[in-house]
Amino acid sequence: MMTGERFGNDRDQRSGTSGADPTELLRIENLAVDFPTDDGTVHAVRGVSFALDEGEVLGIVGESGSGKSVSMLAVMGLLPMSARVSGRAVFRGRDVLALPERERRSLRGRKIGMVFQDPMTALNPVYSVGDQLAEAVRSHEAVSRRVAMDRAAEMLDLVGIPKPAERLSAYPHEFSGGMRQRVMIAMAVINQPDVIIADEPTTALDVTVQAQILEKLIEVKDAVNAAIILITHDLGVVAGVAGQVLVMYAGREVELGSTAQVFTTPRMPYTAGLLGSIPTLDTTENRLRPIPGAPPSLINLPPGCPFSPRCPLVQERCIVDEPDLQETDRRDHLAACHHWDRLAACDDPTTFFRTGAGIR
Amino acid sequence: MTDTSPGQAPSLAPGALGPVGDQPEREFTVTARTSGQMVRRRFLRHRGAMGGLAVLVAVILLAFTSIGFGPVDGWWGKDYTRTAPVVDGGQMTLDLLPFVDGDGLAVGEHPFGQDNVGKDYFALTMRGTQRSLIIAFVVGLVSMLVGLLVGTLSGYFRGITEGVLMRITDVFLTIPLLVIAAVVSRRWSGAGIVVLGLVLGLVVWVQLARLVRGEFLSLREKEFVEAARALGASGPRIILRHLLPNTIGTVIVNVTLIISAAILLETALSFLGLGVQPPDTSLGVLVSVYQTASMTRPWLFWWPGLFIIAIALSINFIGDGLRDAFDPKQTRVRA
Amino acid sequence: MIVYIVRRLVVSFFILLGATALVFWLVAISGDPLEDLYADQSPNKEDKIAERTRRMHLDQPIPQRYLTWLAGVAKCVVPGQGCDLGTNQTGQDVKVLLGNAAGATLRLVLVAVVVAIVIGVTVGIVSALRQYSGFDYTITFAAFLFFSLPVFWVAVLLKQYLAIEFNDWLADPRIGPVPMIALGLLSGLTWSAVIGGERRRRLTVFGVACAVTVLLLLYLLAVDWFTYPALGPGLVTVFALGTAVGVTELVSGLHRRGVLHASLAAAGVGIIAQFVLAGVLEDPSWPVVLLLAASTVPIGIGLGMVFGQLDKPQAARAAVLTGLLTGTLVFTDRALSAVHGYSQRVNGRIVATIGSDTPNFTGDFWQRFIDTVTHLALPTLAIMLISFATYARFTRATMLEVMSQDYVRTARAKGLTERTVVMRHAFRNALIPVTTLMAIDFGGVIGGAVITENVFGWEGMGTLFINGLERSDPNPVMGFFVLTATSIVIFNMLADIAYAYLDPRIRMS
Ligand SMILES: Nc1ncnc2c1ncn2[C@@H]1O[C@H](COP(=O)(O)OP(=O)(O)OP(=O)(O)O)[C@@H](O)[C@H]1O
Ligand code: SF4
Ligand SMILES: [Mg+2]
């Protein structure tokens, strides 16, 4: 498992500060995404807000289906036509969601790069890697193919692909998964973007190459001086590299704060549950403590807190009244829970999820 | 790091999570709706398929109840073989446009008109529809059985069996259908339509066999088959319990398409004189016989044609609905 | 890859060999080839029977007859020996019969296949990009309808209604106000559905298309265009420049100035060429036309190199395409100009309903071309409908599948224009399965051609085949079978090669 030490903990100091900070790069306000389907409207994302500073690393965690990818794709403008997006995504003072398609396109790949989960399918099988990299350059800059190819080779070198000039003419199927993900990273940063959105960049890879790829991603980010939004299931990674963490549950943002605070003093039972499910060396007899149950359907959301059926702290109010995201004991630590104070009153919040706890 | 995994949440019964129907379809809630129910639900929601089904059932009912079938008499009094004096130039008496000439809906004596010798054309068309339908469904059935058999054998056993069967399939694919139809129609012209259907079915199974084989080849590599084999399941058991059920979607969809193609095939053969032989009739025979009438007495040309189209079109829509229903990838998003 | 293709060819050869034996046997047993002679009343009946028995080797067992036939066919592959496909019942050489018939049939089949592919694939792409739009639903329904149409029924329909009514109309071309408005609305609906966009844009497109269509029809009627059709240098120029812009938009987008200039230059060269080459175009021949078409390739590439700036390859491609299309415009213009003269020769019945050409027709190149086209029109349409539907549906499904692939999302994430994403990333990948369909569909089209020839009275291979079948006469049937089966094998091979060319994963294995 990844641990933070490898990357150094200096980034922890750049904890998230909302508000009109002069170095603020991207601010998401009340982002929501609905998908109309035959079975009803899927409320995939219901109110996500955060701010990202230049050079910062923000981690987004949450169960599968909690809306992490959809919210980031909404920012990129990559959702299917049927998606209904609302809210604001202010990038350097301009709301990208309100921009005409033409200008959004010119931001994509140039100012905001993206790395996807599955490198095996993310590259076009019929074009050489060099072509696909050069294309990213030439769609934003009027340069000759040769110049673009030179840049591509440079980027391949940066992400650690040996003999980059020769590999330009290779096709994706000639690369291994890890190598392809390196190519994807090169593609995301080839135009020196300000933000890189990395959607589970290592999930599909071998455990042995996961660490290398992450390390490379952070290294490259520093080389081009970009901020990163890192979606991951790996809390160890978040602890290691992210300054801020955003926790999502059932399409909602349920906790936001600096990594140190969220990890040591979670203010939302779901986060506590997630933390409790990390296997650690000292608790051998009870290695995995999963949160029992499954997230609710995103079509017919029951009233009240979406986590209430699984929450050990659930009380009357939780079932009727959905908690807002609000400040907790610290101004910059937000959580959506009526009873965060009960967590605060407890030394180790993860204990609520120990066997037999809670469910009535 | 999995947040929840199916095996790790034994303490919680599904019911504790609220109404089961509200759960998203995930691994741990598969019990909520079996795949058969899902398929049925998706099929029943498919507007095109439902429309097609309604039309097809209507046509079948009309064809078989009107003039009767075998010993059973129908409600339409006239016989398709009986000649009668030609009334009013054989004009059709059916009137479905009450507002155009103002005399209201009418069926009349000869709704589809009469042919040259005064046979009731409605009865003839119904007879033709019956014959065409029977042939098409026989073709569908036979090709399904043969296709399944050959596809299963070559997909499961591989090796020599597969090689031989697939080469035979290739040869069948190469032979022009018309040649086989010619042999049947000329040598066994008296044998009747079921034989024609049987023989055509014995020719068109090829596509299906290839599809089934393809499915088998990919399925046999899947974990659950490996597991069954490791547990010592016998070959037939693996085929029947694990492989066939998983190909059912492909088979049903393609048999549907074969049936709609068979309708067209029969009519085309009959049109060329290589299918159903007079005095028996089919929709293709009717079009062929009356094609020259299309200018002077167009209804003789239109009715059988319209019935061919109605049948083939409705079956095609049903096939489309089935494909959508069986293909879990397709979650139709309303635009 | 080459090994793979060669191996497939060898396998195909043996399959064909097996199939020929089977087909020969089936035809031979299908009936008594002497049947018609039994009823013969003439005194030399016995002689006739004896002669046919000798000619068809009816005294020999079927396998021996087959081997005789096979030995004759084997000479086709041995150089220096003439082909011997045997004779038919009445002693005519099948090779000669087939030679005459094949031209007509292959023309029909190839035109139908090409037109079906071009239109079907285009419509399929548009309907995938506009999924669940009115256009998409219309095309889906039309495709299902076409799948369900009996070829022969449509053929009769086209013959009796379309051809005859159209010819009658041409005798006195007039469009009443109601049909005129209907045509305008139809055009408006189609264009607004195809171009799509938000409501305002669609309304604008609808209005403009409506108005343009109606005005165009009024203008055409006013200048008696339907009697004396032609484009004229003016329209050729306008269309050629429009083509240049359109091609640029498709190939690279208009913002690539180099590409635009190269295409415009290509259009310009074409426009000038129609005057310079006026003498040649007066009465050319097919070799000349093909030569002219071929010469656009180097000229286009040259223009691409000169004007291309940063995008030389794209500019060359666009220039070649524009050049070819401009050439087609000029060609169309000339051909249309010949219609009036042709019409007078055939008493105004322009759209033909019988045969593959007017018997004993002589005329200049253009009139002969028109003669061919008007005879091809209806049968092509009849065969094409099903093929078109197949391509449209299949392309639509494939495009939808491809458009949901991760690499298309990656392409969008790079900030490529929608045009590049669709044409370069999605369509290029969708082409791979579509090529396989081409090989499969080809056989179906040949089957459709047999029936269509029958309805339209073409003296083609289908007729040869059907006649042979009816008389249990194996040789003509075998001639047809060998020729079509070989062409199917060749088509499959071409599809394999195209497949390998399109897909690097296969090319390299
Ligand atoms: N096009 C769509 N139409 C309908 N629903 C969709 C669509 N795309 C996503 N969803 C739904 O939105 C929800 C959120 O999905 P999302 O991909 O954002 O989850 P995630 O948090 O990224 O999960 P994972 O960790 O598995 O990547 C899911 O329930 C999904 O079913
Ligand atoms: S609001 Fe209630 S149910 Fe929801 S997380 Fe907090 S305590 Fe649990
Ligand atoms: Mg995701």
Image (tube, coloured by chain):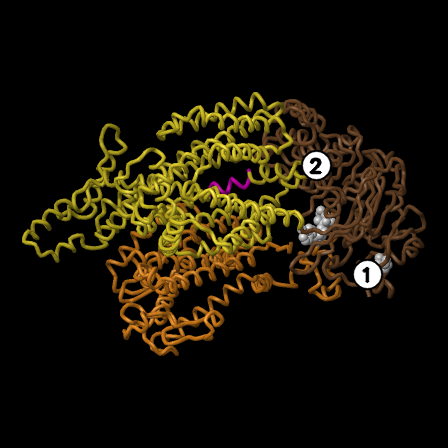
Chain colours: A brown, B orange, C yellow
Task: Estimate the x, y position of residue C365 in percent, counting from the top left.
Answer: 34, 33
Residue that badge 1 annotates: A308
Quadrant of the rendered structure where residue B306 is? Answer: bottom left
Residue behind label 1 places its C-beta within 8 angstroms of ligand 2: yes
Disc ID at residue A287: none
Look at the image and tell me whether residue A103 can be seen.
Answer: yes
Amino acid tagged 2: Thr
Mark 2 or 1, nearer chain start: 2
Of all residues shown, which one is farthest toward the front?
C222
Do the residues at pointers 2 and 1 share their chain?
A: yes
In the image, taking residue A11 as reference, residue C115 lies left or right, namely: left
Q: Secondary structure at mark 2?
A: helix
Where does the image place residue A124, in percent across and percent down from the top left? 60, 37
Seen in the picture, residue B94 relative to A127 is either above or below; the reply is: below
Q: Chain of mark 2?
A: A
Decide: few, some or many residues near mark 1? Use Cα within 10 Å; few <14, some 14-19, many ≥20.
Answer: many
Residue A312 at least partly seen: no
Q: Which region shows up in magenta?
A: C428-436
Name the residue carrying label 2.
Answer: A208
Mark 2 nearby-residue class (10 Å; few <14, some 14–19, many ≥20): few
Q: Chain of mark 1?
A: A
Would you say B277 lies left or right of C320 here? left
Residue at mark 2 to residue at mark 1: CA–CA distance: 38 Å
**Residue at 54 percent of width and 41 percent of height:** C430
Please tell me whether mark 1 sits on a helix, a strand or a loop. Answer: helix
Q: Are marks 2 and 1 in contact (CB under 8 Å)?
A: no
Question: Which corner quadrant of the figure contains ligand 2?
Answer: bottom right
